Image (spheres, helix red, strand yellow):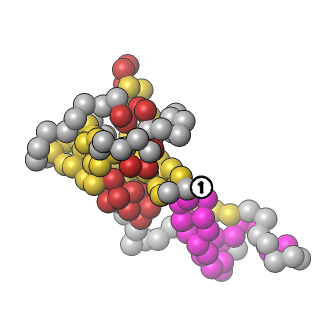
Amino acid sequence: MRGNSTCKMREFTGLNILLFPLALERIDGSEAAWGVCADENAQMAQYLRIRCIVKTDRTSAHERIDSVGGVKPDGTPWKLKQDKAISYIGDGTYVFYIERPGGHRVDVIVAMSAYGSYLKTVSDKEQPSKLLSLPTCPEI
């Protein structure tokens, strides 16, 4: 059945994911279950640890962070504007995370406010507190 199914774009919590129906369509036209489509040309997202941020002087959640940064696995420092990091999450290029004491990994997600999208961790409330607690990025 999977081979004969066509993939469809679906949105889940702000992420667009390409899916295929796992079960026959219901009478009302909705699908009973979905699976992720495998694209042989697609590449796996690269995991990047956010180690630092550049803050703004704004107080609203979506404007508090200007940039995020870290070090790639090859030792190269990187820094991205928040909008670019959000774009990379959306297109599946990167998965960002922070690391808490004891090596506990906390995923970074895209949150939505009435005024725009912004980065925060899965354990943050509205404000990106865990990201804001990171040190300031050096100039690159």
Q: Quadrant of residue 40?
A: bottom left
Count the labels in the image. Answer: 1
Question: Mark 1 is on which residue type?
Answer: Thr
Q: Residue at x 79, y 72 (%)?
A: 30
Frontmost residue, 94 versus 68 = 68
Please state if 117 lies on the left or on the right of 3 as rendered. Answer: left
Q: Which residue is mark 1?
A: 13
Frontmost residue, 23 versus 56 = 56
Q: Residues within 10 Å of mark 1 (few under 14, many from 20)?
A: few
Q: What x and y, as percent, mark residue 126?
A: 53, 40
Name the quarter where the N terminus is drawn.
bottom right
Q: Quadrant of residue 49?
A: top left
Q: Residue at x 44, y 61 (%)?
A: 90
Q: What x and y, as percent, mark residue 7?
A: 60, 75
Magenta span includes 69? no
Q: Residue at x 39, y 72 (%)?
A: 41
Q: Is residue 126 visible?
A: yes
Q: Is residue 88 above or below residue 69?
A: below
Q: Residue furthest right?
A: 27
Residues in magenta? 2-26
Q: Secondary structure at mark 1?
A: loop
Please state if 93 lies on the left or on the right of 9 as rendered. Answer: left
Please state if 1 lies on the left or on the right of 50 as rendered. Answer: right
Q: Residue at x 87, y 76 (%)?
A: 28
Q: Is residue 74 visible?
A: no
Please state if 128 lies on the left or on the right of 78 as rendered. Answer: right
Q: What x and y, as percent, mark residue 9?
A: 58, 72
Q: Residue furthest left?
A: 140
Magenta span includes 11? yes
